[in-house]
Image: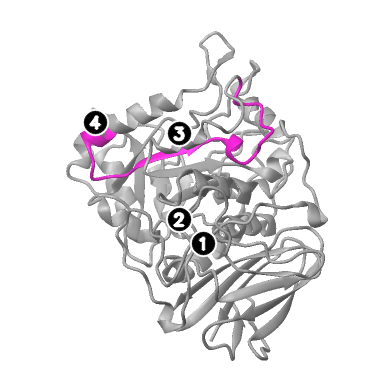
Amino acid sequence: MHRVTPVPHALAPALLLALALATATAACSGGDDTTAPASPQGSSGGSSSGSSSSSGSSSGDGGAPGGGDGAATGDTGAPPIDGGGYGDEYGPWAGGAAYYAKFTNGPPSDPSFFPISVWLQDPALAKDYQAIGVNHFVGLWNTPTTADLTTLGGAGEHTMVDQGAATLGLASSNKTISGWTHQDEPDNAQPDGKGGYGPCIPASTIQSGYQTMQKADATRPIFLNLGQGVGNTGYVGRGSCSGIADYPDYCKGADIVSFDLYPINGKLDVGDVPLGVDRLGQWVNYQKPVWNWLECTRIDQANPKPTPDQVKTEVWMSIVHGSMGIGYFVHQFTPTEDDHALLDDAAMKAAVGAINQQIKDLAPALNTPPIVNAATVATTGTKVDALVKRQGGKLYVLSVSMGAAATTATITVQRGPATKVTVLGENRSISIQAGAFQDAFAGYAVHLYAVE
């Protein structure tokens, strides 16, 4: 991801990530070709024959299906939510923000909290990022000082950093440090010190490091970020550690697991993003939060630059498929290096701020279990995936088109009141009759509905 993405070539570091991003076997595809397996969060919403499916109903491989009125909340001990007495059934779920309650010095467990992060940023920029809805700094270039933590805390930011004697000392009296980080992307080929690359760091090493960090401080979660191989099956940057068989073992070495994948910069299928989220959810058996990192800059001058709409699509594909934390990679490496390029791009900065505000507004709903039997989605072409939640007397149907071709979706509410539909953030409402309403989706469009 982040500093550089290892690939089996000896190149200048500034160009390394660009090459790794370009090692794709599939270019950005369109029409009905952008697909991801159904997950317990966002279901496949339709097919070329116009069939329908329950939103969030499939558990995928390795997941326990929801049943009855009980939510599968992992090891949080959170009580089931009754869905207002409508007979809602829930899919597997790690517990939302409530998951963090078991860590006395971890991220907030308040239902209004949804993690929105940036990677490797200067604490001096804390208020700039606070202004666009960021609430977490993951990774810092240097060991933080007391002044750094004061600056971050003053802007309402939390941080996750490397664990060591200095940071353990700071953390003993400062809750701004909300977690500990493993080395970034241990699943990728690692520099061999001779200008080349050796194998990945074994999953057993990550598990051992996890146990060591837990012994030093069990009051904060351990965060692990993995590389793009999680979603990009053809990725060559893992070197001799190719394939995905070892990823479940990596996931045993952390309390929060994430991955990074930048499909526009890397000329990949955008469907690799939700695919990666689905896979991580399955590999942690929906017992731990899954986060993911997305692009918002032209990382290298040779790469395509994502548009604000493409960033929005990636964000909501992630959330619809179960991501419980969104991170932005905000760097640009060439033609000039800019480690906070997002802040220097007025249009993208405004767009990311608007996306983050919607996430913040919806956090209380996002922090409830996914409902698998409250609504169905049917289309006549490109499928539309949806995540269904109920909170505050409203049913939320959070929907995203999974392909480039336009389509029309018919959404049918099966449980609870359904007399009014508001399209959030679009200043419009939709007529609903007998519990069903229709809406047009442009390619990769996002529509977020509140049904009352």
Q: Foreground: 413 or 183? A: 413
**How far apart are the alpha carbons under marks 2 and 3?**
27 Å
Residue type pointed to by label 4: Ala
Q: Which residue is mark 3?
A: 250
Q: Which residue is mark 2?
A: 134
Q: Position of residue 121 (x, y in %)?
A: 45, 41
Which comes sooner in the sequence, label 2 or label 1?
A: 2
How far is the residue under mark 1 from the one under mark 4? Answer: 33 Å
Name the amino acid type tagged 1. Asn
Quick check: 216 left or right of 358?
left
Cα–Cα span, label 2 and label 1: 7 Å
Residue 231 magenta-highlighted? yes
In the rendered structure, which segment of residues is drawn in magenta? Answer: 213-239
First in sequence: mark 3 or mark 1? 3
Residue 356's disc number? 1
Q: Is residue 431 found inside the magenta-colored segment of the image?
A: no
Residue 451 location (% of width, % of height): 56, 83
Q: Quadrant of the N terminus?
A: top right
